[in-house]
Image: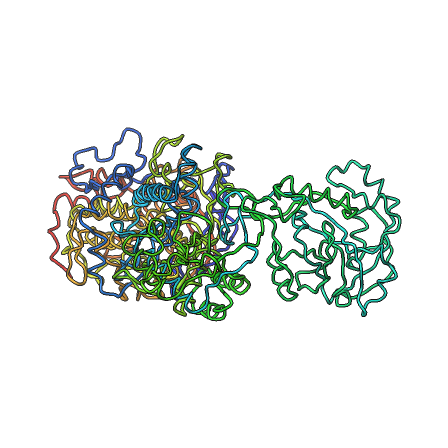
Amino acid sequence: MAAQKFSYRAPLLKISYFRNTNATSLLHLRRSSSSRVLSLLNVTRYSACSGQEYSSSSKRRSRGPVMAGKKSEGEKQGDGKYKHTIDLPKTAFGLRANSVVREPEIQKLWDENQVFERVTSRNTGGSFVLHDGPPYANGDLHMGHALNKILKDIINRYKLLQNFQVSYVPGWDCHGLPIELKVLQSLDQDARKELTPLKLRAKAAKFAKSTVKNQLAAFKRYGIWADWEKPYLTLDPEYEAAQIEVFGKMALQGYIYRGRKPVHWSPSSRTALAEAELEYPEGHVSKSMYAIFKLVSGTTSCKLLEDFLPNLGLAIWTTTPWTIPANAAVAVNSKLQYAVVEVHSNSVETIASSANKEKQIGRILKENDNLHLIVGLDLVPTLEAKWGVKLTVKATVTGAELENCRYVHPVESRECPVIIGGDYITTESGTGLVHTAPGHGQEDYVTGLKYGLPVISPVDDEGKFTEEAGQFNGLDVLGNGNIAVIECLDENLSMIMVEQYNHKYPYDWRTKKPTIFRATEQWFASVEGFRKTAMDSISQVTWIPSQAENRISAMTSSRSDWCISRQRTWGVPIPVFYHVESKEPLMNGETIDHIKSIISQKGSDAWWYMKVEELLPEKYRDQASSYVKGTDTMDVWFDSGSSWAAVLGKRSGLSYPADLYLEGTDQHRGWFQSSLLTSIAANGKAPYRGVITHGFVLDEKGFKMSKSVGNVVDPRIVIEGGKGQKEGFGADVLRLWVSSVDYSGDVMIGNTVLRQMSDIYRKLRGTLRFLLGNLHDWKVDYAVPYSELPMIDQYTLFQLENVVKNIKESYDKYQFFKIFQIIQRFVVVDLSSFYLDVAKDRLYVGGTTSSTRRSCQTVLAAQLLSVSRVLSPILPHLAEDVWQNLPFTFTTAEGHVANFVFESGWPVSNERHLAFPEDDVVFWGKILELRNEVNKLLEVARTQKLIGSSLEAKAYLYASDDDLVSRLVSLCSSDNEADTLHRIFLTSQVEILRTIDDVKENDISCTGEYLIDDKSKAWIGVSRADGSKCERCWNFSPEVGSYDDHPSLCSRCHCVVSHPIPALAAAS
């Protein structure tokens, strides 16, 4: 760290130079070079002459006509008789983006010139296919859509610059319940009654196509490049036919079967649901019940239970009391210890009369004086506290010994067995015994298969009890039916207690209403048949972030068979016929191929309007009267999961497997998985080589967006403005935000974040405008050979080359937030705050055709061409706007004139620029830090009214490092003015001192000291500059007044004005 002083010697402080190897650093320089010096800007400093503290954030004032900031009072930049000799920037490129108008103009320019198609067809580096996951065509786009599509577009545009032939076909998921519900919601009751399946399908198709049109326009406004003229829609006949083909391949390999199994069922939608169609909102409360199933017989291996009969019961716990009528067994864990406990219920009145209204105590605890129960031994203390009773352990048995004991069903008189369940039976909650209803639970079903238990499911499509449920017939299982079952058990002295239970429960993601598990006849895909192949293929895919592999592996390894049938109208039909009498299905290779050929020509509507004899192959037509068409449609995840076959496998220019899939993290159980399962089942390989997942978009406080809360950030309003946002930020600001976030987790957005992005965008635009403006008279022939460039220019090209190199590495790793950090630091710190700040002097007043100006323009041209191109995947509108304002023509290495930025390709690596000597890298790191320290001392001098502009100052330097002093002296006396220290420090003079022993504090009154590398002492002083102020460049010089023809000019300006330098010869 460092301290400055005024009129006294400051204490010696330390500074050490170090290499920044952080992943987000600007340069990632070579192993032993010094990239930056430790910044002292965050240190508070004191001025001895006033005793006042000042902040390091103080802004430097402008320094003469070379700065575009503040001027001295009464002076205006460019005023005076020499203003015509100043080379000020000139460009039509506006400082304001005017994005709402300009971006659509640029997009129109791209479309009219078919830039995407031209670049793709011209590229020779092989193909790149990012396969688009289809969004639902059922509403307006939200910020999640914007994040997803912009990420894809950044990747595609980068691949274009890398000479790949990019094929990107956008898609839409057009079938399924979301769209069907939208149609039904738009109709009144009378219209719904008259709605036939074909009319509903026509309205759904119309709605979907209309939504696709609107969403397509919105995606294009984001600046997304795609094959918009030929997107894929899952309702297209050719797509539906390809889906039928995938289904057929799976069926013929034995992976498709029909069975009666419990599935997630939505009473509100009246259809089966897949796991991916569920959500688990917070705050769901169920009525959980502890109940007793009366034991009637033991087993020969467990005769001790007979001592407690007939007053012995099995204690169970359930959060779905409505499933009790379907009970077929009680399951125990063979490895657990169970206890026979005596219930002492004399304290029940206390809990029953308490203020706890959430608990309801059963009659059996109040009326039965001789009650014994079987519960998990480890749960005895917990159940005592829960029920408010004393439980005395009378005996213990193992779960294995309880197998085949018999009990009486609590509602009906039939006997049921005790069976051995799986590891899902624990003592973490409940009683250690599980009420088993194979018709209402997956684990119950699997356990029931081992024992041949009946699959009872007395519930209809609306979620109401059927006649099979007896006294509960017609009651809603999630409402009054649940209450009726509880009351029935209480009357039968089988209910111990009921209480409210807050837990996660599956809801229909479309209707936002709870679902149930219900056994129905459905079509399934047997995942077990190809699970191992699927697991093996997962390990061959590149997953970004890497932990995504663990997630999809866990989901795939543990998932049950896939229920692929839906009881809806709007979808692709399952191509099956049923025998009228036997109900046996007819589905084979011939029938599936015939239906596929019909659908490919007429679309899936044909299934509804064609007769059975027309849908059957010719050999079966004489049996048509014996068959009826199936009415089930396919799960929409089967629709979208077949896109690899319908799109990648059918479209020219595409390839299968795709290079990349990119969607939200929820698609591990959705599109990623359905695509994987169908592709593995049909072809034995994954449909993708790489998969990228991104998180969800939250508001800027980290909360989920909700219309009811009012925290939704609409991408359309962000871009165009409206609803409290006066002006739109434009698509590029939104894209800049996308690049700034680490999308591997959830990301946040809001007005504050967007304003920050807008400020950064303005700085980027301002820098690019400066580069354009100072190249207004530039031609490629003016380029100065690298060997003739000043050292500061060579160092700057070294920095630029490293920036481009590291940005490329970040693009290749899909780490766009690192690009955002690199480019922001490079533009704001290395360019604006240093190089461009220093360059203004030679650009504006160095002479139009001087070697120093031309060498600087050589660097500016390299910076402009590189920065605009590396930014173009993220900010394509800004980059194209720059390109259309280039004052010179750019020709690629292949000899093509790049009329558009994406025709220019990625910047070609320049190894000579990267070969900037290691010692020089370290030296320039020290120069930059010296400059920072000089600036701090100049601020002290300015605060004390010693100087105004920095050009009024003279800087003094002393260092104990002889090598450093020698190099500093050489800079001060450099033949190339651009490398002189006073130009780098933006002072009028710099003097290197060999010793400071004889320095008089009255002459150099503002000083400071610090250490370099903990050993080399450095000292800085500032005084008023010598001489008078030059009228043209505002530098101070003793030579001002020496020239009769121009008495107010310094020697440099006199030379420029009196003897204009001829234009330089063309240089390679």
Give the colouring mode of the picture.
rainbow
Judged from this view, the residue extending furthest toward the top is 74
Instruction: Give the quarter of the image for residue 423.
Output: bottom right
Q: Does residue 971 appear to the left or right of 460 in the view shown?
A: left
Q: Residue 291 versus residue 821: which sits nearer the camera?
A: 291
Asked whether residue 222 appears in the rendered view, the answer is no
- Percent x, y for residue 811? 36, 58
- Percent x, y for residue 450? 64, 66
Q: Quadrant of the C terminus?
A: bottom left
Residue 717, placed above or below residue 909 = above
Q: Does residue 976 appear to the left or right of 593 in the view shown?
A: left
- Percent x, y for residue 430? 72, 53
- Percent x, y for residue 98? 28, 37
Q: Residue 5 versus residue 429: which sits nearer the camera?
A: 429
Q: Does residue 337 appear to the left or right of 899 in the view shown?
A: right
Tell me the residue at 22%/65% (across/down): 124
Q: Residue 815 versus residue 376: which sits nearer the camera?
A: 376
Instruction: Give the quarter of the image for residue 785.
Output: bottom left
Q: Does residue 237 appear to the left or right of 695 in the view shown?
A: left
Residue 419, placed above or below residue 949 = below
Asked whether residue 66 appears in the rendered view, the answer is yes
Q: Residue 429 versus residue 178: which sits nearer the camera?
A: 178
